[in-house]
Amino acid sequence: MTLTREALARAYRQMKTIREFEERLHLEIQTGEIPGFTHLYAGQEAVAVGVCATLGDRDYIVSTHRGHGHCIAKGCDVAGMMKEIYGRRDGLCKGKGGSMHIADVTKGMLGANAIVGGGPPIAVGAAIACKLRGDGTVSVAFGGDGSCNQGTVFEALNLAVVLQVPTIFVFENNGYSEHTGVDYAVGSKDIAGRARAFGMPAERCDGSDFHAVHAAMQRALEHARGGRGPAAIEAVTTRFYGHFEGDPQLYRARDEVRRQRESMDCLKRFRDSAAAHGLSASELDALDAAVLADIDAAVAGAKASPPPAEAELTTDVYSSY
Amino acid sequence: MAQKSMRDAINDALHLEMARDPRVIVLGEDVSGGAGGSSGEREASGGIFGVTKGLLPKFGAGRVIDTPISESAIIGAAAGAALAGLRPVAELMFADFVGVSLDQIFNQMAKFRYMFGGKTGCPAVVRLAMGAGMNMGAQHSQTIYPLLASVPGLKVVIPSNAYDAKGLMLSALRDDDPVMFFEHKALYPRKGEVPDGDYTVPFGEAALVREGEHVTVVALARMVVFAEKAIDALAKDGISCDLIDPRTVSPLDADTILESVENTGRLVVVDESPPRCSLAADIAAIVASRGFRSLRAPIEIVTAPHTPVPFARELERAYVPSPQRIEQAIRKVMQE
């Protein structure tokens, strides 16, 4: 299925929104106003958007500690996300979750997750619900290259095959598990191959190329929606910042990020081929301006939002107790 | 009213609720048993303890799901299915296997409601078979509920008899929070009066199993049975006790315990777990801080020792609190 001009423009706008969201956070974090740990998704936008552009609100995703991109791509409210990251009352999770726990079940977004490998079993459970409903919906388990070394992920891959449920495992190989390189930490150096060994189709794709990710996801979806069980994608990508904000990245060659920003920037690459898809540079420029205005508004809104009331501390633990 | 074992009572509850609510599914290792076997017998076990027997033929493999031995995936899948609108019951088999699935229990399902700002719950039930007494050794015998009772977001249910087990299970299946349902293996065959139809036993309401005036005894699961024996043996000496079975330890009905201690002035807490950070220690602390002025004697706790569960018959018998030890503890607080 080829995407319409409108769908492509939407995808570009989402990728740009993620980029500017993260670039802005990178600056705002330095003011000290944002509490806690933040893991930026800049550089990986084509993966989240290429995958989620194929999904609807009734499809599910589980995300990771580096989850802002997945949230935006799945339709979470950007202003609500920003408030959440600032720990404010009106945040998507009332300021109780923070950057690593943003969720919006009404959008099928079952949570960012601060435990590496925590999400995939949950995605398999959501896919059990999809299969029982029989409505063609699917779940997607986003994970990094680091997660592919977790036992929970092996369990989830196998269980999904055994139960023949429609889960698509998307491994975002950004080259680093925290500060440790993939070449060191992934024994076989072949993440797609691992998934394939569990009995599902798996392919490696260029994670900096929106169109490549989208096409791989289409193939995976066709398989899963056809009732033939799970599929996997290894998207080779990069992150433009450290593992967390403040990470001095001493494990990376000095000019690695600069080179990758030139050769692996999914936004530049999208622009390069935009004319072929009927999108003009001036249209994209207009989208860029609209995105920047959105982000400005989101940050201003977050700064203006009050902190949660102290009484909120003990609410939302149980439905009743 | 029919006499039923606790095993059949829980089975009853699962049958009733699966028939009533199509969102209820059951998953776990061998919940039907036989998938992929050479005999072709599709329901070869109905659960390693027989608690899920008959569910597969009635509700089908779409809702009664045999899984590989992958405890993290079993619990995680239950968590995800619950987020996606189902009401899963995950069987962990032995409660000790909490060790290989703890992240999914205490970092994931327990925290969703809070982390996500109260916008979604996680209505999953995890069934855990626990307890010593069958010489199953250190990794198949623990009463590991204190670990989970300490986690905000989880509810922890510990029935001591067939009637309560069915009513508590029906409550658990209708609850909107994750419920850890501990079933003592030694109680599975014990029979009691169990109504056929639908009834619930609410969470957070202790049962007054015996009424007396001298000592308050609090006990859980199999220890309720042992405490009854001890209390009956003391009757000939004119000692009578309130015996309180909390039935759920999260939420815990502290008020019923405190009210009883107000009358008796003496407390004995019996817990099959080791003593440190146990339910016995927790209940003793609550009464010591909130009911101190009612106490006429130091609180006695009767627990397992601070050791793993041993294997040999003689050692295991020495590990589990006995009716005799409970009796001695009651006599001791009576001396004050």
Image (cartoon, coloured by chain):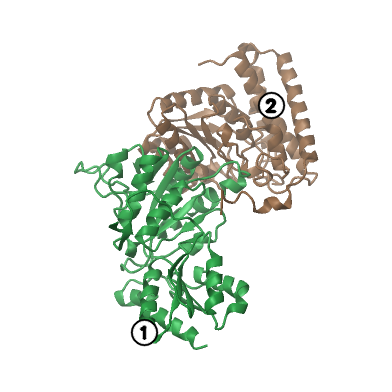
Instruction: Please tell me whether mark 2 sits on a helix, a strand or a loop.
Output: helix
Label 1 chain ID: B
Residue at screen point 32% across, 48% down: B31
Marks 2/1: CA–CA distance: 82 Å
Question: Would residue A133 be seen by someone viewing this image from the given angle?
Answer: yes
Instruction: Please tell me whether mark 1 sits on a helix, a strand or a loop.
Output: helix
Chain B: drawing colour: green
| Nearer to me, A84 or A117 | A84
Question: The chain drawn brown is chain what?
Answer: A
Callout 1 amino acid:
Lys
User: Which residue was labeled with disc 1?
Assistant: B236
Residue B212 figure quarter:
bottom left
Residue at screen point 37% across, 42% down: B18
User: Which residue was labeled with disc 2?
Assistant: A16
Q: Say if mark 2 contacts mark 1, CB within 8 Å.
A: no
- Residue found at the far bottom of this picture: B335
Residue at screen point 58% across, 39% down: A175
Question: Would residue B67 be seen by someone viewing this image from the given angle?
Answer: no
Query: With B56 as the anchor, is A83 left or right in this view?
Result: right
Callout 2 amino acid:
Lys
Q: Categorize mark 1 by other alpha carbons within 10 Å: few (<14), some (14-19), many (20+).
A: few
Residue B166: x, y in percent?
38, 54
Residue A160 figure quarter:
top left
Residue A253: x, y in percent?
66, 41
Rendered position, A83 above or below A261: below
Residue A5: x, y in percent?
61, 14
The quadrant in which the C terminus of chain A is found is bottom right
